[in-house]
Image (spheres, coloured by chain):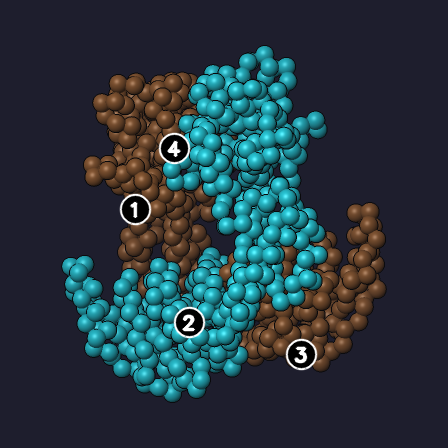
Chain colours: A cyan, B brown
Amino acid sequence: MKAEIIAVGSELLTPFRLDTNSLFLTSELNQAGMRVVHKSVVGDAPDEMCLSFRHALERADVVVSSGGLGPTDDDRTRQTVADLLGRKLYVNDEVLQSIRERFRRFGRAMPQINERQAQVIEGAVVLKNPRGTAPGLWIESRGKIIVLLPGVPAELRGLMEREVKPRLLALALPERLYTRELRITGIFESDVEQRVSPLYAEYPDSDTTILAAPTGIQLHPRVWSDDPAKAEKMLDEMVSRMSLALGEYLFSTKGESLEQIVAHLLIENHATIAVAESCTGGLLAERLTSVAGSSAYFLGGAVVYSNELKTSMAGVPGELIESKGAVSAEVALALASGIRKRTGAMLGLGVTGIAGPSGGTPEKPVGLVHLAIADERGARETVMQLPGDRERIRMFSTQRALDLVRRYYLYPAHGRA
Amino acid sequence: MKAEIIAVGSELLTPFRLDTNSLFLTSELNQAGMRVVHKSVVGDAPDEMCLSFRHALERADVVVSSGGLGPTDDDRTRQTVADLLGRKLYVNDEVLQSIRERFRRFGRAMPQINERQAQVIEGAVVLKNPRGTAPGLWIESRGKIIVLLPGVPAELRGLMEREVKPRLLALALPERLYTRELRITGIFESDVEQRVSPLYAEYPDSDTTILAAPTGIQLHPRVWSDDPAKAEKMLDEMVSRMSLALGEYLFSTKGESLEQIVAHLLIENHATIAVAESCTGGLLAERLTSVAGSSAYFLGGAVVYSNELKTSMAGVPGELIESKGAVSAEVALALASGIRKRTGAMLGLGVTGIAGPSGGTPEKPVGLVHLAIADERGARETVMQLPGDRERIRMFSTQRALDLVRRYYLYPAHGRA
């Protein structure tokens, strides 16, 4: 079955705002067995909107829209769809009561304009929206299904999960989409592609999406199937063969972030960690502490921009900075060992580098980053020359630093000092 | 003139990827005088793609597409548009040479499949793409303009800026879009709306988009006009009246981030700053150092999760933590003053709070955050009870901390210790 998503709202046609609701809607529709064949964004002009719905109904079996259900003159989705289907709008008493009731709960009288939100298309099923005033509408017409949802993400999500998806699942479509997710770090997107693409031909019923981000590369093998057991088996097999092909670069097959993986490993090993970072400016500490419960393993960090602070906060000898330079293997090692000692942590991480755009020299260009990890036996250093702008260099540096911790536990032969 | 944007690519119909190119394209089209009336995303099935282009040509004067110009079988934009217009594809020798040359520069022979990228639609203008192998194509047909661009963002941007926009500007459309941007922090979106919306009725030829994010609220007043001087004057007037209405909550009318504003103020005042943060885990230091050249004012930071480190790194007396609790006004003040002294910075910032999801108590619930700013005369504290999840609480806390620095300089009567 084919589905189409329409986002309604003139603000989505400006350079400032994206329709992000469609990602969630796509995921839910796929799980209910619908393939999304087209997405569109349209403003609130009724003729434009009408065209979009008409074209969508020509193409798809299910059309889901978001937005345009508010109380103002600009909110025209209800009227437009009613006109297109040749149906009337009427004020639904039950909906009107629930809107009044909602305003009463917040200690206000319902403004007159909100009565508009109680308008329902003849023959539509009203989908209750406990998070807002506008209900969703489910309309069946000439073998097609049209679902109108509000654009507010929390309201849309609630309605989709509780009202729309169960109804779609009740259609009991024979085919569903089954998926897995693998996350990889430390190699390029093209390397990932090269390692896994030979498998594609062996699983012609599947397709695999690859998505690169500074926080890791995601691989999503997907199978449309009418046989759940067969699909799950195929995906399990794909995941295990892909895992073999990706080796130590694979860090998760369950959708966890690298931060979460590092958190698991530290907790499992009853370890504590501290960081001393220069060019990453706090981002490494921020990522380590972005995980709920990080106080179990994270003791603290020093963001040491000035040379004086590298000495006073992380114990790097002033002579070392003078002789080797602040961006050097030796200073990275001293930062990792120094912060470990200062804080009493079991592991220390040190980062020093040149994030740019200025500060580079022919010998030490922008993008040069030294990382080190220290334990009670000593410290180990690694150096990178990173491409990209300041933000990218900082993000990749912390990605690699987190990966040092993962490798320290999982690949001790390479990773340990 | 009406424009429509089509993003081609099956991966854009998965739950994992958004068409972000369209924001940039919209901005460029608007500046050249085109209103974007519709955006769509379509997969690489030729019949679906053909429908999207056909519908777009019915609606708009200019159709710009991104994607589907690669070398593989899945890249069908050229063929589909050629078929739709009833034109032929031919291999353009000049394009073929330039693709071969590009591969030669990287020390490789051109793979056979890349020859496909030298295919050009009859009558099309070839738009040179120095950043990639696929050129753009500019096609005029029955009074309409069709522009095909590659989907890789850097290539699309380069082609749009250097090849497409000048050609669109040469059409010399009478109307153009003129815009401004105001950035606000410290009040809710609804408060911003309430303060500025009375102005809307006085400028009926304008429309204003409001966009809320944890890093501040953006207001974009926009005017379509055929009279540049009149439009600029109207916008200047709107900006100055909006500025009055927004008062001290307005931090920029030039599109700068709060980090940049704080950087300007610190540099202008020849000041240095250091931070000691607990619940924000490094994010405050990260934001202060995200600005290029931040080493001019940022000395360093301490991320002090454990109580021991609050004492050893930021000089907070252990007795104070014991008597008042780690999350308290007193500890925030001691963090700000302590880090200032330890680092020799002119200003110190302290943050302590409960980011959650766990760690809250009835007296000190999740979202309770104490902030302090210290100078040579003493320290000043502020407390907030923030809604939302861990990420949101951390982001809002740092936003408010940065704003303390802005207010320290711009509103010293309130902001100074």
Mark 3 vs mark 2, foreground winner is 2
Whether residue A253 is situated above or below residue B341 in the rendered picture: below
Residue A208: image location, x then y, percent: 61, 59
Circles 4 and 2: CB atoms closer than 8 Å = no
Residue located beneath label 4 in the image: A295
The kind of residue on which mark 3 rests is: Leu
Residue located beneath label 2 in the image: A169
Taking the image as shown, residue A87 lies to the left or right of residue A260, namely: left
Instruction: State the SS at label 4.
Output: helix
Rounded to the nearest whole Å, what is the CA distance between mark 3 and mark 4? 61 Å
Rounded to the nearest whole Å, what is the CA distance between mark 3 and mark 1? 53 Å
Corner quadrant of residue A47: bottom left
Residue B35: image location, x then y, percent: 51, 67
Mark 4 vs mark 2, foreground winner is 2
Residue located beneath label 1 in the image: B387
Instruction: State the SS at label 3.
Output: helix
Mark 4 vs mark 1, foreground winner is 4
Residue furthest toward the top? A319
Residue located beneath label 3 in the image: B84
Corner quadrant of residue A393: top right
